[in-house]
Image (cartoon, coloured by chain):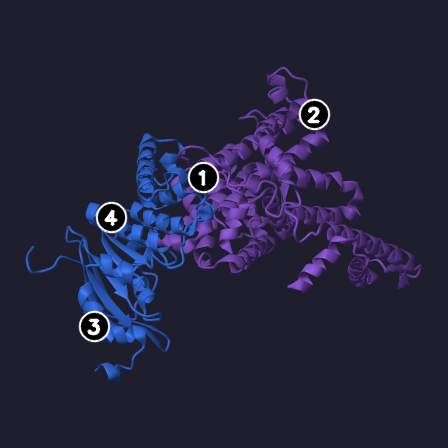
Chain colours: A blue, B purple
Amino acid sequence: MNSAPDLILDVRHLTMRFGGLVAVSDLSFTAERGKITAIIGPNGAGKTTLFNCITGFYQPTEGMLTLRHDNNRQFLLERLPEFKIAKQARVARTFQNIRLFPGMTALENLLIAQHNRLMKASGFTLLGLIGWWSYREAQKEAIDRARFWLDRIGLLDRADDPAGALAYGQQRRLEIARAMCAEPVLLCLDEPAAGLNPREALQLNKFLLDLRAETNTSILLIEHHMRVVMEISDHIVVLDYGQKIAEGAPAQIKNDPKVIAAYLGVEAQEVA
Amino acid sequence: MQDHAENNARKSRLDFGGALKDAFVAALVAFGLFSLMLGVVTKTGSTGTLTVSPRPGLLATSVAIVFAGRFLIALIARYRGKHRSGPLVPPRITSTVHKLERFVAPALLLFALAVPVLFFQNRYLLDLGILVLTYTMLAWGLNIVVGLAGLLDLGYVAFYAVGAYSYALLAKNFGFSFWLCLPLAGVLAAFWGVLLGFPVLRLRGDYLAIVTLAFGEIIRLVIVNWQDFTGGPNGISGIPRPSFFGIPFNNEPDGFAAIFNLEFTPTHRVVFLYYVILVLALITCLVTIRLRQLPIGRAWEALREDEIACRSLGINTTNTKLTAFATGALFAGFAGSFFATRQGFISPESFVFMESALVLAIVVLGGMGSQLGVAIAALAMIGGFELFRNFEQFRMLVFGAAMVGIMVWRPRGLVATRTPSVFLEDKKPIPASIIEEARQ
């Protein structure tokens, strides 16, 4: 490794305004390829807004978001609609309040994540309609991939159960698996540990670390659960009132007076 | 807390006071409603003047019936502790219904195939069969839009009209045959579906429903007012009747009967039409079943479940909605061109909002997304409509009562379960309650 870091995401001067409210203000940070970058901050700090800008659900007011694939292909995320960010730039995300397809089975949920690949294989439905072999093979492959991920999250025996009938922790895991089925280069997780018990949170830690090690997927993580954040992240960005107040390795952040002030609500003057 | 428990204990016994109160309120409402609807009648006098005469007896009787009925229902409901009891239909019955379901579809199909043989002499029944199948096909087509993709479309009849007029105009002006016009009519209807879809698909739910409703009316009004092209309110008559792949159904030496050495009867044509619409409806059904197992169908259903999640997974929701609209419209176009060739005459009268509402009612009653439920609902609704033709005045009353009944006992339609499109080990039907619960 040389000195220049291999960046996957480069956020520059990102500002997001909703009328008079500035949710994210002049935010710049970078995320390295194959690393877990955590974004933390008190409630209302603009973390989810940042995610929505990265994944295209919001059009940023100002700023530039560059995503680089490892073949040096670049995507300017602020110019793409959300489905193209998922399809071409291959950024996958999960949601703070789980967004599965509750009436469809776990397996179907994972197949929908592979929609674009299957769509192409089915000749945009026309070949699939007559049962073309290429589609049948693609479908088999897609099911195998889904089976692999179901096995990884320990839900293989629930494959044919509707997602809405799964327990909360299982739904969280299924949502991550669904995002992974899209084979993303950047995985954005919005509070994956929210509502999990300590044991489940520990499992999640291990799962995310394995994920990074095995698939070399870069992960962007919003989390309140400090144990999760401190244990697994390589790099932490701290937001407060839409601005970056600190950035660095977990050990560094843990002792940053500004961060402690933001979390414990101490007046800024007292710290300084 | 204690109060509540006492209340329950009291209610578990026969609670005459509460039931009386309920019945009184219901009777009051009934009086308010019926005093104008039944209580007075207008009569034309000998000089042509309208006189209003009251009918206190009828009014009193109907209010009394409402009072007594509500009293009994309230009494029974309180006795059973309605709020605590489970589903109205006991699970035992529901499970037997599930077991029967597997045999219902093949039985219905066999019956549908056999109808012309069984009722060859009964022209009325054959016509009714054609009508039922036409609505089944329309409902199956709408099922793609409403049931699978979850887009509430109140203007579906517009595409039916486009199909019918496409056939009528192409066949009359250019002499195209039915089998050539059929795909053309479908494609034209699908084209209009896409055209409508583009501006509308940003809307959701109620807003989408209103715009589609308006679109249905626009198409009808254009047909009414564009006299030179569509014949306006006079409609188009003398639309070529279908032939048996070029052999006409007439009493000539080169007609169908003569060539196949049969005695001539006009029923041949009706039977042929019956099988044409049966095949068209089955194609609609099979294509829908097939589409559900393809990525596009799965994306439609995912769209119904959660649009934002779809977009986060790289699904182009605009295109996906448009294909749903276009596919639904395509089948409506087919049905429309069949309708035109069967009737031989079409006018804007056939494409009023009531038709859209009827088809939508069939889909909702049948259970959104269920092919079998929709077919049964079409049979019940259209067949039932005909059954009550003699009681012209009460037809809508019975229709409404049946709707209310079904919505009480099976609020999610006749077949409310969803069959997964793909499975690893076994295919378990998904109860609608799970879908519903998760949405709240």
From the image, state whether disc 1 or disc 3 is nearer to you. 3
Are there few (<14), some (14-19), or many (20+) residues within 10 Å of tag 3?
Answer: some
Report in which chain the residue with disc 3 lies.
A
The answer to whether mark 2 and mark 3 are in CB contact below 8 A is no
The answer to whether mark 4 and mark 2 are in CB contact below 8 A is no
From the image, state whether disc 4 or disc 2 is nearer to you. 4
Q: Earlier in the sequence, mark 1 or mark 2?
A: 2
Q: Position of residue B363 (x, y in %)?
A: 58, 44
Disc 4 residue type (three-letter)? Leu
**The N terminus of chain B sits in image quarter:** bottom right
Q: Which residue is mark 4?
A: A211
Query: Is residue A10 in view?
Result: no
Give the alpha-carbon distance from disc 1 to disc 4, as whole Å: 32 Å
Report in which chain the residue with disc 1 lies.
B
Are there few (<14), some (14-19), or many (20+) residues within 10 Å of tag 2?
Answer: few
Give the alpha-carbon distance from disc 1 to disc 3, as whole Å: 54 Å
Disc 2 residue type (three-letter)? Phe
Are there few (<14), some (14-19), or many (20+) residues within 10 Å of tag 1?
Answer: many
Query: Is residue B267 in view?
Result: yes
Report in which chain the residue with disc 2 lies.
B
Do marks 4 and 2 share a subunit?
no
Give the alpha-carbon distance from disc 2 to disc 3, as whole Å: 88 Å
Image mark for residue B119 = 2
Give the alpha-carbon distance from disc 4 to disc 2, as whole Å: 66 Å
Disc 3 residue type (three-letter)? Asp
Query: Please, is residue A24 above or below residue B45 in the view?
Result: below
Q: Position of residue A220 (x, y in %)?
A: 26, 58
Q: Which residue is mark 3?
A: A256
**SS under mark 4:** helix
Give the alpha-carbon distance from disc 1 to disc 2, as whole Å: 35 Å
- Tell me what residue is drawn at x 69 percent, y 50 percent: B404
